[in-house]
Amino acid sequence: MITYVKGEHDVLSNFYLNQLSYEDYTYPSAEHLYQCIKCDHHQDYELLHKIKQVSDAKAAKIMSKRLKTNKSWENQKPLVMAEILKLKFIQCKDFRDKLTSTSGYINHNVPDEFWGTGRKGKGKNVFGLLLAALRLGVALEYISQPHSRKVCGRGVNVSGIPMCTIMWTRFIEASGPFIPNHFVPLLNKQPGMEPDVVNVADNSDAESVTDIRDAEPVIDVRDAEPVADISDADVSSYADLAFDINSTTRSDNLVEENLCSFIDASDSQNIHPLSNGCLQNSFLETTEVINLLSTFSEAESHDAIPQGTKNDVFFMLRNGNNITNRSNGKKSDFSDDCGVWDKNKGSTPKQFYQQTSNGLRIIFKRDEAYCLVKRVNKKRIYVPIEPQPTPETVFELSRSYAALKKDSNYKKRVSWLAQGAKESVAVVEYLGQFPGLAPHGNSKSGELYLRTPASVMTEMSDMLRKDRPLNVYNKLTNKCEVTSGPSNRKQVHDKNYNDKKKQRIQDLGHSVSRGNIADHINEIDKMLAGNKDTIVRSIIREKGKAPCLILYSDSQLEDLKHMCCSGLSIVGVDKTFNLCDMHVTVTCYKQIAVVMEKTKEPPIFMGPIYIHDNSDFDIFSNFFNHLRVKLIDADTEQLFFGTDEEAGLVKSIKTAFPESGHILCIRHLKGLVHSDDDICFDVKCEQIEDRTKELSASFHRYFATRVARTIRDLWEGTTPPGYFDKGWTNNNSESLNHVLKSAINWQSKPLLDLIVIIEEIVETQFKDLQRALVSRGQYRVADSHKHFEITATSWVNKTVQERERLTKRFKSYIPPDKRVITSTDGMMNVIKPRALGKKIGQRKRKINERTTTFKKKKD
């Protein structure tokens, strides 16, 4: 008797380091191979690769503990271990010699209750039984733990429907582990019929036939105590079932094929190894389907339909996600790898059934009452059932039928209970022999069509919300198996397009044509005609020119009135390119009510936007004349525009706002002018004019009439009083252009998409402006507006109307001119000196030079 599989018997342990070759790879130990097969079954290929790299068998076991095993693996793991031991028996001489030299009961004394005897010695000791059976040469698939189980198809699956009941017996007195060698099928007794007696020949003796009525009583293994020694005479009684350990014809490849038969899901010649049962030339009966759906648990079901050939089998699936989708108006998803299913040859019927003492019967639901149907004068009449059945006895069975497009004889049926199920499960049946894949009906290349799994498509949609299609394709291709990843890059791009199209339909309530710019303008015109609030305020169309769009919100217009028209901020105007198929002219200004949290500088806000094609005076006049009308009640004398001196733009501004000021970027002016004062500037201008007369008469006229005059006029012109010490720069507009191009990921967008992006930016900036009142977001209240700041608790306690009034006062507040100083008694206001008595360029503090008086000497 072997008590411990260690010490002198350590070679029998899976932790013993002996190389095992399997599928063109050599594993350091049997434990490595077992854990790798376990990872492959659960599709955790990253962990599988890591286990292959470690050299210690115990480390391989510890690493695999993170896997959450399913019911399918629990059913298959004894058979997988049995085949690994066979493989080890053939390839490892030390293991073979040690095992054949021992005798007696093998006790795997480890804490594991399944593989060993456990901590209290009451474990199943499956590993010890497998070693003992291998030593005796028994066909390991006939060892049963527990002794009652369901046999379904090829292999063992406890969740399948039993085709018949077989009594397992042992013809001789049991000694050691119970190993059956006599099998008797038990037939159901029909009423009024005496069942036939079935005689089963014992495999150990072809001439002996045992009648089950005359058979000797068999010792019940539950009452029998394990015997320490196993008689070698028992081997002859099941010689035909034994695995001949001395046979030289059994090759390594045969062992590997047997091992694959338990774990390979792509076996096309036999029953699918992950199936829950087999079909007998027809779909399951309704009684069987309802029994499965009402008793099967989600823990025993598959997450998705397994890949591989499916011939006359059925699977149990988790159906919770599909129930949620159906409640949200979406379709169920039972996708597989069989190809294209012809929905025109299928149907989706629903039927109610009532469980009675005599079985199931069909009932109907009419006017919230369950009825039976009767025929009176060849007409169907629904008669309510009295009394009405209780909800526990009623099942609502939904079924979906489909036929394969390549071969209509290969059919699929999905069934689930909308009422009466304890857990959300579905049964998927495949009837017939799978004919193989075929090209898709819409394919032009003729390649075989393999559907991408629904789980991959769902993950693709989630990733496309945050990443580019190319990056999504690369990530999914590296993550998924060879046959389950995206079919090509076009599929990812199409998915991205379709998802956005569905989102637009959901937002707008109808489909949108986006074939060309005319479709975009047509959709925008519908937006203006409807009641939906949009940032687009006007569409301007002129003969022979492309349409123009004016975009702004009410909040932007209010800021122009209260802030820019009060001289608190300068309106920057700049045209940018490559945002869409048209030019985009963006206005911007600094919102002085708040400052950036990090830089403590006022943020740059986006003002009204003009989308146009031409850039002449007529086109720009449409935009600024529109703003002139909207600002008719505001005093625009203190309104200043800053531009890059584009001719049509400047002319249209001066025409629409003649009383307003116009300035250029101070940095550009300083770059052109290097003079200390007006006299130096005039001298340099004369020198340039003399030089240009000699070189080019046309440039001389341009410089004298345009450049020099413009610089002098703008430099000496009026500037905003009091609020701007540093001067205006065009960097404000350039910064906002950068924000827009970053938002579109530096790729030109369709017009409708660009409008949506602009609208989101505008809404976000004003939402953050409001959040600054409670010190949230990226802005903080400026010092000049600190008296508006409140706590988050105070904000929550305010009503909606109170919040709106506070926000309106905050945005419209005009701080006092910082040039004006008020006396202590409040009676006198004076302008603060700008130079403060300093020299030009002086930066040091004002300290007068001390004078020394020398003491007179006495004569």
Image: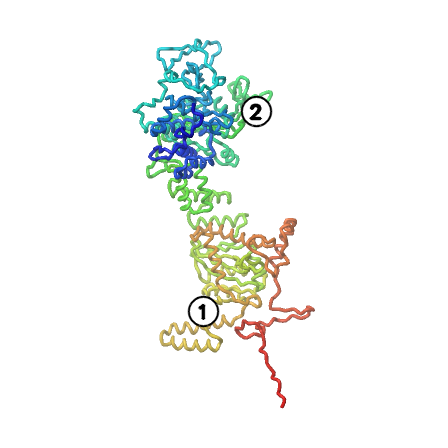
The kind of residue on which mark 1 rests is Gly
Could you tell me if residue 822 is visible in this image? Answer: yes
**Position of residue 512 measured from the top left corner of the image (x, y, whole percent):** 46, 45
Tell me where residue 72 sits by quadrant: top left
Write down the residue under mark 2: 392
- Indicate left or right for 218 with 801 as reference: left
Which is more toward the observer, 654 or 762? 762
Q: Which residue sits furthest bottom?
A: 859
Q: Callout 2, which amino acid?
A: Glu
Kindly identify which residue carries mark 1: 671
Mark 2 vs mark 1, CA separation in Å: 87 Å
Neighbour tally class for label 1: few under 14, some 14-19, many 20 plus, Cα within 10 Å: few
Across and down, in percent, residue 244 comes to 34, 22
Q: Residue at x 46, y 67 (%)?
A: 668
* Label located before the other in sequence (2 or 1): 2
Asked whether residue 340 is in view, the answer is no
Q: Residue 60: x and y, percent? A: 42, 36
Which element carries disc 2, helix, strand or loop?
helix
Q: Nearer the viewer, residue 823 or 351?
A: 823
